[in-house]
Image (cartoon, rainbow, N blue to C red):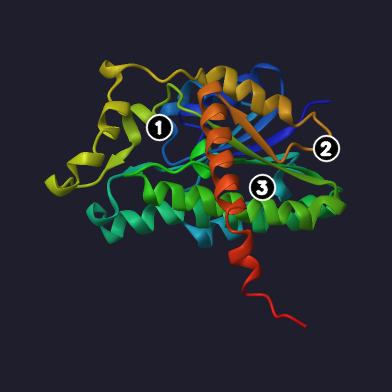
Amino acid sequence: MGKTWLITGVSSGFGYEMTKQLLEKGDVVIGTVRNKEKVKKLIEDYPVNFDCQILDVTDFERIHTFIPEMFGKHGRIDVVVNNAGYGLFGAAEELDYANIQKILDTNLTGPIMIIHDSLPYLRKQGGGRIIQLSSYGGQVAYAANSMYHATKFGIEGFCESVAQEVAKFNIGITIVEPGGARTEFRYGSAHVAELRPEYAHVHDFLNMLDPTKGLAPGDSAKMAARMIESVEKEPAPLRMVLGSQALTATITRLRERVADYETQTELAASTDIQE
């Protein structure tokens, strides 16, 4: 029997690939966009199975009415996918308040609200899955990406905690940590701050955003397929890294972090109360 999916940000990237693959196999997708023009063909090709909805994940008041409406309309939603995201590049001093707030609202607060408002329905229906798009940037931090990392580290902590709270209700949460992929997120929608010459030493990220300087190794269609497949795994994998470069970088950074902590044994113990 097919599943019903709620996926945010389906007009491009992973959201679009997941939606296309799911519709092709007969599942129902409630896909959110800010403009339906980019998914016009999907709307035409799948008039029954594709329920395209307008939603800006930074509109928190709308989220509070949207989630009940969708569960009410479809009766059951098996998988909730927080995919919509915003990329912001630049050193911390180069960022303005408006873009800081926008990335927090898009990548952190909006997804938190969607999960928060979906949980009562998932619990009452006897379970379901939540897929949270993060990045290996939720574990590994680079210069000139501070706010992106802040949102990804933040949403990962939120999801890891919530996963423990809802496991008894048969609700599984999977944090997806993709590496670089050939998507519009990387080569089109990413926002670059007003760069300052003082921080020229960290502006090499511009090469990453320029497809003429070499393309990212990740295949977005294959990554979308792995995300779809993950909902059949029991128990739900808490984290899933997609891309060999991402996995290597993550393991390297985690080993460095553990090694640093292990040098602090005496320091940590020195603050304990001695009875």
Badge nearest the viewer, 2 or 3: 2
**Is the N terminus in the top left, top right, bottom left or bottom right quadrant?**
top right
The answer to whether 80 is drawn above or below residue 243 in the figure is below
What is the C-alpha distance between the residues marked 1 and 2?
A: 30 Å
Kind of residue indicated by mark 1: Phe
Compute the Cα span from label 2 to label 3.
26 Å
Q: In x, y percent, where is residue 48?
A: 66, 27
Q: Amino acid at mark 2?
A: Pro
Comparing 23 with 166, the one in front is: 166
Q: Between residues 74 and 59, which one lies in front from this camera angle?
A: 59
N-term mark: 3 or 1: 3
Q: Residues within 10 Å of mark 1 (few under 14, many from 20)?
A: some
| Quadrant assignment, res 6 | top right
Q: Which tag, 1 or 2, sits closer to the chain's start? A: 1
- Label 2 neighbour load within 10 Å: few <14, some 14-19, many 20+: some
On the image, the x and y values in percent for residue 116 come to 66, 58
* Secondary structure beneath label 2: loop
Does 184 sit above or below residue 275? above
Can residue 173 be seen in this snapshot?
yes
Tell me the tag on residue 174.
Answer: none
What element does badge 3 sit on?
helix
Nearer the observer, disc 3 or disc 1?
A: 1
Q: Residue at x 75, y 32 (%)?
A: 231
Q: Which residue is mark 3?
A: 70
Q: CA distance from mark 3 to mark 1?
A: 26 Å
Residue 112 percent coordinates (x, y): 58, 56
Q: Is residue 72 above or below residue 228?
A: below
Does residue 236 appear left or right of residue 93 in this picture? right
Q: Quadrant of residue 265?
A: bottom right
Q: Badge 1 is on which residue?
A: 185
Residue 235, numbered circle: 2
